[in-house]
Amino acid sequence: MLGRTATTIGCRLSRLSSRSLRNGLLCVATRKYSPPAAAAVELANDLSLETHTDIQAAAREQAESRSAAAGTASEVSNSGTSALQHAYQENTGFGTRPIYLDMQATTPTDPRVLDTMLKFYTGLFGNPHSNTHAYGWETNKEIETARDQIASVINANSREIIFTSGATESNSMAIKGVGRFYKKTKKHIITTRTEHKCVLESARSMINEGFDVTFLNVDENGLVDLKELEASIRPDTCLVSVMAVNNEIGVMQPLEEIGAICRKHKVYFHTDAAQGYGKIPIDVNKMNIDLLSISSHKIYGPKGIGALFVRRRPRVRLDPIISGGGQERGLRSGTLAPALVAGFGEAARLIKQEYPNDIAHINRLSKKLVQGLLAIDHTSLNGSPDHRYPGCVNVSFAYVEGESLLMALRDIALSSGSACTSASLEPSYVLHALGKDDALAHSSIRFGIGRFTTDGEIDYVIKAITERVRFLRELSPLWEMVQEGIDLNSIEWSGH
Amino acid sequence: MSATPTRGQVLKLYKQFMKNARQFNDYNFREYFIRRARIGFKENKDVHDSQKLNTLFKEAQRDLGVLKRQSVLSQMYTFDKLVVEPLIKSHGHSRGL
């Protein structure tokens, strides 16, 4: 089919002008060309359609330029590198691209999602808000289908879904929007310490606008105390924001109980479900959720789109952050991106359709990974072992520094926390909130398992981590002391 | 409307699914669609209701179209092999699952 299309296009083009031949892909033998042009055509004929993206080459170049910049590297650091090289010795006969195990940062776009999106880039380009012609109607219809698909995952009405640019925007919109709308009478917001940065920062910016914000503590399992939550609700509280699934430790909060408390006290309940949407059962009606943030690229959809569920009955009012033509019930103006919306819709349809298979697969791999990793000495699972989404496994490896373990694991794409904070060397604030000490928070690594993770990858990861943790510990003087039975807490370190 | 798909037709469809899934250049997508096809056909193997069979068959044909297009695309935009992928192809697909 593809070949046929190509030839048809080729015929058309040849009739237009030979100029089009310069693009090199299409060619037709019906016209006579001057010798140089003919040569170009011949060359184009056996041009491969394959375009290879060599990612490792960039990495290699970077490494080379770095070592060149280092120039006269001392022998000491040289010996260090060679020792480390031993640690991540690559298997010959295998590829070089790292295994992707960072599903909390983002997920690969499902080919079925891409298939839905392609038609918007090849012809279906209308502005969905143009209601005077067919181009607009076509795309608008697709958008409404997507809205239905997205709403049905959480048992909402399609009119309650507002498209945004992502969960960060959704969260900001919910917290700032609700706060600003009710600011005359209610000036108190409740959230937790383990929320995503965007919720914490939005709440912090509301403090500047004169709001009171309560940051609830969590227990060592990462769960909020419901009694403490209820006790901190005041007559002027307008919003409670608690995330569904934590992005670093995968802990699920008791949404239904929180929803019941909020409804009882007539306070709006917002939940950041970027990591939970489609992955854990969520029913906005049963759980009394008033606002819910969704991100498309965490469910194998395209990046750059998300949604906010805003309840209609009882109605939740919010001040829009973006003003404009009044799209999306006036809450989020601006032309929608039909391709992204349709891709998001298809991703939502798939996450619902594939739920039983995905969850069984992820559960099985997660169990295998946790078992394999906890078999190493002095390792511990962070967060509640029961109230968790199995696709997020956060493990601390005592006496190993997380960052150096990540450096030694170049063949596995992992992170020690959320992507936004991985640039800083600060230990994760989420693990701090759980009461973990600095050392343990520094030595934690997050593993994300998804729909496309395979058994082979998990086996590889367990083997690689076991080997390299052992290797790094052998270098560590702390580990030596632990092996000798010295209690590290009894040592008085001399200060500098 | 159309007659109930025969056993042969279903088997042919399954073979086509497997063939196209194996042609994915991307390791993770390839393994997933092979697994998904196996599970999908297995879980519906006891369906005998002709109406349900018809709808399933039609859905599967649509899915096969998607798979065909996407496996071709996957062969056009290729990336380096993963560290778990053998560079020398050991006939078709790996028996990872």
Image (cartoon, rainbow, N blue to C red):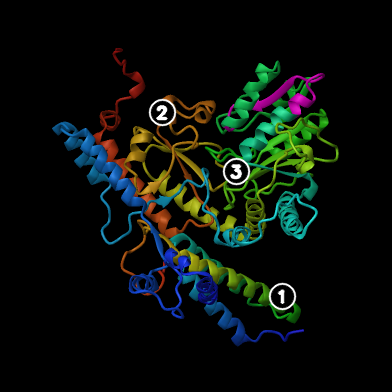
Q: Residue furthest left?
A: A75
Which element carries disc 1, helix, strand or loop?
helix
Whether residue A286 is visible to the viewer of this picture, yes or no, is: no
What residue is pinned by disc 2? A425
Residue type at mark 1: give it. Thr
The quarter in which the C terminus of chain A is drawn is top left
Residue type at mark 2: give it. Leu
| Residue A15 x %, y % | 53, 74
Quick check: A105 left or right of A284? left
Which element carries disc 3, helix, strand or loop?
loop
Residue at x 46%, y 81% (from the top left corner):
A30
Q: CA distance from mark 3 to mark 2?
A: 24 Å
Sequence order check: which comes first, mark 3 or mark 2? 3
Q: Is residue B38 above or below residue A327?
A: below
Residue at x 73%, y 29% (from the top left corner):
A177
What residue is pinned by disc 1? B55
What residue is pinned by disc 3? A275
Residue type at mark 3: give it. Gln
Q: Is residue A182 above or below residue A56?
A: above
Q: Residue A240 falls in which quadrant of the image?
A: top right
Q: Residue furthest right?
A: A314
Both labels 2 and 1 in a single chain: no
